[in-house]
Image (spheres, rainbow, N blue to C red):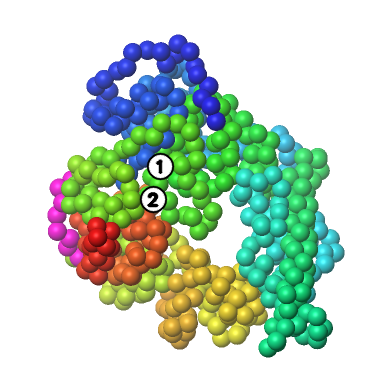
Amino acid sequence: MKDQKTPSLFDQPAVRGRMIDGFPLTAEQEAIVDAARRGSVRVQALAGTGKTTTLRAVVNDTPPELRIHYLVFNSKMCRAAERTFDPGRVLIKTFHGLALAATRDWFPGRTLGNIRLTDLRAICGDISPAGDGMTRAETFAAVGATLRAFLHSADANPAWFHVPGLFRRRLEDDQTTLLLKSGAPHLLGPGNTLSAAGERRVKEDVGRSLVYLAERARAAYDAYASRRPGVLLPLPHDVYLKAWQLAGAAIDTDLLLVDEAQDLNPVMLAIVHQHRGRIIAVGDSRQQIYGWRGSVDALDGLEGEELPLTVSFRFGPAIAARANEVLRLLGSPYFLEGRGPDDRPFNAQERHARLFRTNSAMLASVIAESAQGKKVHCTRNIGPLVALLRDLCLAYNNQWHQVQDPRIQHARHWAALKEELEDDIDAAPLLRLVEQDSAAAERMVESLSGFSSKPAASADVILTTAHQSKGLEFTNVALSHDFAGRAKRSVEELRLLYVALTRAKRALSVPPLVANEIRSLAAGLAA
């Protein structure tokens, strides 16, 4: 990507002493506004450092002749931005919203909808099972999953590597079992294993199946993305976004602002790459916590000058020091300076937010706090989590026919299910809970069936996970004990801890086990 220079409009002398809402910009914010005059900028905005204020300053500094688009991640962020920016000056859209506006005339008479199994059956017709051991229904499910993986990618066509791991492993296991049962001497090795020829045969057979699934996914995409009049299929949101990206995704604007740039998926990043004008991408690479769902860090993938925001007005020095301990473990070149409200000791009797690493720990706390008569607010609807836990209990007890979740249905046996869900942030902790004590998990489902979350404003305690807390802030925050033992496992866990620590404004409670773990890791790093 090369910047398209706009002559004369930005060729005005630099300004100092800029103000937003009566407050002067920091030196870092001034530097970013100046850099935006020169070209594209990648802003590493640490927690609570005023990225929205900085973007407003960039907008205020931009000549009125220039058009500005602001791309945000979801509709909630869109509504928040509309309250902050002048909609007459800045066009605020989600990626899907901008794509829909650009492609509305491409799909005449289509209604928006989702990818449905019934549609795939109509598109693919009398589909053959993708491999020995797979049913036609499972093959349709594999086609749908392959299509979704392709839609989130920057690739031009579905390919074998878009087939999710669950189905690839199923194909390999089924084909291996078939050959072991065949009795063919040239395919069998000692000890009921496959010979080298048998392993080659498995790879060849699985390869053909993967190509077949990719071809069916291609046919499904072509049908969903058809621009012919009279198509009755619903138009999935990810389909028109992908169609726009493949068509070049021309964003007709002079200045493109991109928020939460560290969490873009590949198709969104490809769209940003295709813009030829100035780009101001804002995010925090240390808050990239959605790698499990395919996000990529655009701050690492875009051109432009990199500048930091490190002065936080959310919290004071004590909380900043806690966060900096984790930033050092992450190898961050930037560290927080806390200039926010005065720190104070945490008081569990005061209204506070409690942050959890896992959904299972949060659900247990919902039950415990409710039993004490406290008004509990959850930042997410726990109904789907309870339904997921119920299905996992059914699967563990071999009651597969009662399971509703398609991912669990298609696994067919517990070992395969464990392998498939090991990296799923919702399912993996619940699965481990069921394995440890299935009876307790069933009691939890029963206890939570009638739970009703109270409004946040009147709640005694607010419960959320680290993932759900991103973008939120609370006066008083307590971290749960289930963060202990995780920070040493991966960079992702350290990032989650950093996100959790920086949600607090005045008071922060960190369990001793977690604090000791951070100190131990820091000592190891120093050594």
- Find residue 121 and report its horizontal and vertical position in percent: 78, 61
Above or below, 439 relative to 490: below
Element under label 2? helix
How packed is label 2: few (under 14 Cα within 10 Å), some, or many (20 or more)?
Answer: many
Taking 160 as reference, is 299 left or right? left
Check whether the beta carbons of the residues at disc 2 and disc 1 lie within 8 A of each other.
yes
Q: Which residue is mark 1?
A: 283
Residue drawn at (17%, 63%) of the image: 347
Residue 453: mark: none
- Find residue 471 and report its horizontal and vertical position in percent: 37, 49
Say what amino acid the circle numbered 2 marks: Gln
Residue drawn at (24%, 57%) of the image: 526
- Find residue 71 and report its horizontal and vertical position in percent: 49, 37
Q: Which residue is mark 2?
A: 287
- Magenta-tinted stretch: 341-348
Taking 58 as reference, is 167 left or right? right
Decide which of 316, 475 is in the foreground and name it.
Answer: 316
How packed is label 1: few (under 14 Cα within 10 Å), some, or many (20 or more)?
Answer: many
